[in-house]
Amino acid sequence: MTTADINIAVPKVATEAPTKLRLGSLTALVIGSMVGSGVFSLPQNMAGGAGPLAILIGWAITAVGMLALVFVFQSLATRKPELDAGPYAYAKAGFGPFIGFNSAWGYWISAWVGNVSYAVIVFSALSYFLPSFGDGNTWQAVLGASILLWLIHVLVLAGIRQAAVVNLIVTVAKIAPIVLFVGVVAVAFKLQVWSLDFTGLGNASLGSITAQVKSTMLVTLWVFIGIEGASVFSGRVERRKDIAMATVLGFVTCLALYALVSLLSLGILSQPELAALKNPSMAGVLEAVVGPWGAILINVALVVSVVGAFLSWTLLAAEIPHVAAKDGTMPKFFGHQSERGVPSTSLLITNLLVQAFLVITLFAQSTYQALFYIASAAILVPYIFSGVYAAKLALTGESYESGEQRIGPLFAGLLATVYGLWLVYAAGPAYLFMCAILYAPGIIFYIWARRETNQRVFHPAEAALAGTLIAVAILAVYEMWTGAISPL
């Protein structure tokens, strides 16, 4: 998860002409939105709970499910051009303000928790050179991450955006090492290593094939977060038909890279060896092939890439509640911005939450993987309701011309919804409970926003849903307090 051109999402001064995105830059935005820290840790993250067969099945399920989501986003961008605020706008339009709010809230949670994971993985990578940083969750690493966080905060407040040259460096730093990795590892690939325990059933700790496949689901979701990038910026495209093409091109490119990185690695090191690697695990795999310089290359590439992504997603995480405040979904104070056009209040609140979670990682010894699992689970609400909304439009015929074919969009919407629900099941109770704890406080801000606009707070169904969410959050706190669950 990262964003190469997030500067276009930040409000610009009135004298600047709006940037219109063409197919090339839109495709780059989609790819840049997805390729981040996740790919550098794929070998260990996938092999940590699955063997080659389950990983193959996991990628197949992901290919089908994410492709359905791709079609959902391109269809909604075309049929609902007035909804330019991203997935939460679809949930709000289709299912009311409370569902829309929770989609915005979940998207925001995913963004800033993802930033915490970025901070952890940066210092985990730096531990190759300075071992005291450990897995990115030692006090030295948390201190360094905190300094980085507030340095970026100051830079953003100053109105600094990523310049074209910085974007170019970050993009090359991400893509070039991945392509090099795939090429080198493909040459060194050993079929006998890959097929050593093809089913993974020789390792009892992995469980059944189904259990192994489930273990890959949040990993594959994490590396595709950002696939909605073209849809989010649909209001800034030159031709709306380019949204579909850019999204498909970005998806196919990233799917190929991701699958090759994880599957080829299994032909270099066995599943137990990959599972034991520290992250970024691509460094360990390449080191096994070419020696120490391979690990140095990957670790340096990750640091450059993720620091750029950290800046990008700091802007994005602050932008989400800021934009939502403008349309009354979030309280008005989130909409405050500085003279330089920076969403300063939203930025401060977002980074205080990132700081709080960095401290939690120190005491809970939270790993990069645990954090991105939470971020992945949190984004399921806006993704699922985007799928349901697309299916709803196809069923009712809203936005369709008389006689227009609706079977394809209906199937895509239903498939994306089923895929999202499967991911909810695959996430398991620990991460769902953690998300409930993070979602429940949002009810306070929803009530705040509704009262500011003098609107009815809850309809009966919404009140029941809010009550259920609070009850699940209370249960989750109890389960964590007793030690029954511990996602961190």
Image (spheres, grey):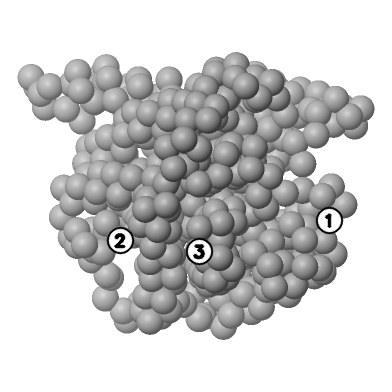
Give x and y (percent) for residue 439.
67, 37
Give x and y (percent) for residue 126.
67, 69
Q: Residue at x 26, y 21 (%)?
A: 410
Q: Residue at x 20, y 30 (%)?
A: 399
Q: Residue furthest right?
A: 482
Disc 2 secondary structure class: helix
Q: Nearer the viewer, residue 165 or 182?
A: 182
Which amino acid type is shown beneath numbered disc 2?
Ala
* Residue located beneath label 1 in the image: 362
Q: Residue at x 62, y 32 (%)?
A: 49
Answer yes or no: is residue 224 visible: no
Q: Marks 3/1: CA distance?
A: 34 Å
CA neighbours of label 3 inside 10 A, class few (<14), some (14 to 19), many (20+): few
The reply, left or right, for residue 127 in relation to residue 57 is: right
| Mark sitting earlier along the chain (2/1) | 2
* Residue located beneath label 3 in the image: 290
Q: Quadrant of residue 120?
A: bottom right
| Mark sitting earlier along the chain (3/1) | 3
Q: Nearer the viewer, residue 483 or 103?
A: 483
Q: Is 120 drawn above or below residue 370 in the view shown?
A: below
* Residue located beneath label 2 in the image: 28
Mark 3 or mark 2, whichever is nearer to me: 3
Q: Is 350 drawn above or below residue 372 in the view shown?
A: below
Give x and y (percent) for residue 445.
66, 44
Disc 3 secondary structure class: helix
Which amino acid type is shown beneath numbered disc 1?
Leu
CA neighbours of label 2 inside 10 A, class few (<14), some (14 to 19), many (20+): many
Give x and y (percent) for residue 421.
50, 22
Q: Marks 3/2: CA distance?
A: 30 Å
